[in-house]
DNA sequence: CTCCATAACTGGTTATGACGTGTAATGACA
DNA sequence: TGTCATTACACGTCATAACCAGTTATGGAG
């Protein structure tokens, strides 16, 4: 016994890193260096169990972390897949500042006000490329940032997609990301139009502001990579939610 | 047997919702309606086990989801706590568009280039309110969005804080959020200054752009609620990463 | 040949149990 | 009285074991 001072200074810490972290790193590397290509890949959980000689819970923790990072996504009953890298850039560009904020990762969620099928009508029908009497699905949500409402979103999608979306966790997941990752649509771009308006009674109630308060209104038509419209939205943002943006603009000009 | 068609149409789906989701909702409500106050709260995992009559893994999944949402945070060996709501708004405002993007929730992480102690120097010392020869900790990170570098961040904090940060998962967590949630600092606001510049050789290599490519340079000094500087950063953003912002500005003017 | 029940996958959920590590209060020893 | 080992308790990690729920291929019944 030479120096049994206070603590045995962690001599044998061969692996202070949890198993699932090590596995996560290995898998991440395999994805980033291209060993696992985008879409349609990844061994099943069972295979990974025997490959690494660990239990399923460990594999799942590793995969779950990678999913949080967005590198992979899972489809129940089918398997685990590598996300398409390109996907995100499009989404990032067309989401703009509003949803960027609402997705900052902390204390954001949406409350689904309604989700129902109805006739497209002239305006929405023209955008989505369907007849005015054709049925589409309308989704209304209030988006919360830090427990306070920040935007009111009205989303229109085709009946087929809408019925699938009804089963999703719309309170915490982005429609864009569901379309892109879970449903396999490649999003191409979006046309958007921004204007200022005043909150009417309904909007004021949803956003918890005074009637007549300034609201930013965004009209956004999202299209697949092939140029086919897939998602049309009206977004109403509280005007007082963008101080940071203004500040930056002033400095930037 | 009246209509044993294809499937028994899920008559008995008393609870199609997973246990951990139900528990998560209950806990979320308790937090949002104030039953559990900010900081210093939440029953331990063992207590929740007996309260809800479920296993620990279920409790942990519920808590883990709430942590992802940012409503709670955990401290090893101590317990689980409710996050302070106020925290986020400040962070949201002073993070601005750059980190909002990088935190959109998918495929973002940081690579720690270096983390070391050094003398503050005149510029940093003045900002942080310490002498030029006093030791501070410098953290250099490359922030990845969608597997491509989007920004190069240089962060300066006091020696005490820096040594704690060294033990954190800086690759996936925001320094702001660590300061706010884990360390209990109340962030008050920030001064920031934005300018355009051209990438030098070092920066070009970190951001994987051509030397001379346009870069957005942000100087940001973050302060606690009491007005004491706590975090000083230089942020270098790839100029080509902000197309979406430009587009929105054009429409907005 | 079509339809459909079944089986063999996949991931999703939950239980039980164990051990590790960090935190903080306790108490014994110097 | 002050230091330090003990201890109790918190969350962190990992294993084993089921069963549930979608997906898809197979194969038999019509």
Image (cartoon, coloured by chain):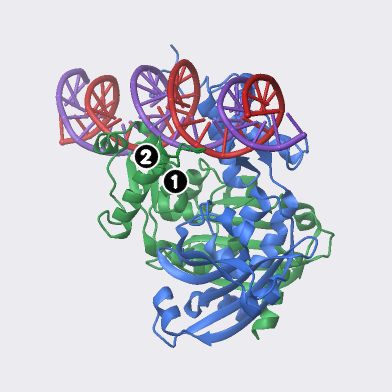
Chain colours: A green, B blue, C red, D purple
Q: Nearer the viewer, mark 1 or mark 2?
A: 2
Name the residue nearer the viewer: B63 or B114. B114
Location of the N terminus of chain B by quadrant is top left
Q: Quadrant of residue C6?
A: top left
The answer, for residue B102, to whether it is visible in the render is yes
Q: Residue at x 52, y 51 (%)?
A: B167
Q: In the rendering, at what x and y percent does residue A81 appear? A: 33, 48
Q: Chain of mark 1?
A: A
Residue placed under numbered mark 2 in the picture: A12
Which of the marked residues, 1 or 2, is nearer the chain's N terminus? 2
Q: Are marks 1 and 2 on the same chain?
A: yes
The answer, for residue A236, to whether it is visible in the render is no
Q: Residues within 10 Å of mark 2 (few under 14, many from 20)?
A: few
Residue A146 relative to residue A85: left or right: right
Q: Chain of mark 2?
A: A
Residue placed under numbered mark 1 in the picture: A65
Above or below, B231 against B201 in this view is: above
Count of marks placed on residues: 2
Mark sitting on residue A225 = none
- Badge 2 element: loop
């Amino acid at each position: 016994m030479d120096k049994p001072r206070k603590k045995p200074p962690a001599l044998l810490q061969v692996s202070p890193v949890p198993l699932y972290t090590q596995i996560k790193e290995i898998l991440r590397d395999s994805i980033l260096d291209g060993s696992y290509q985008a879409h349609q890949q990844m061994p099943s959980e069972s295979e990974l169990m025997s490959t690494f000689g660990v239990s399923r819970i460990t594999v799942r923790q590793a995969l779950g972390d990678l999913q949080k990072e967005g590198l992979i996504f899972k489809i129940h009953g089918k398997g685990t897949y590598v996300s398409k890298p390109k996907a995100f850039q499009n989404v990032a560009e067309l989401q703009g500042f509003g949803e960027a904020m609402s997705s900052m990762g902390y204390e954001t969620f949406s409350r689904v006000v309604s989700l129902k099928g109805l006739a497209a009508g002239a305006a929405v029908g023209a955008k989505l490329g369907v007849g005015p009497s054709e049925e589409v699905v309308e989704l209304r949500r209030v988006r919360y940032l830090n427990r306070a409402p920040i935007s009111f979103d009205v989303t229109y999608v085709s009946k087929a997609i809408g019925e699938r979306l009804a089963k999703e966790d719309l309170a915490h997941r982005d429609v864009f990301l569901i379309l892109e990752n879970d449903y396999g649509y490649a999003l191409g771009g979006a046309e958007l139009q921004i204007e200022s308006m005043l909150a009417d009674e309904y909007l004021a109630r949803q956003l918890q502001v005074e009637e007549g308060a300034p609201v930013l209104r965004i009209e956004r038509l999202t299209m697949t990579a092939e140029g086919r419209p897939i998602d049309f939205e009206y977004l109403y943002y509280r005007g007082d939610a963008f101080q940071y943006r203004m500040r930056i603009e002033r400095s930037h000009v």
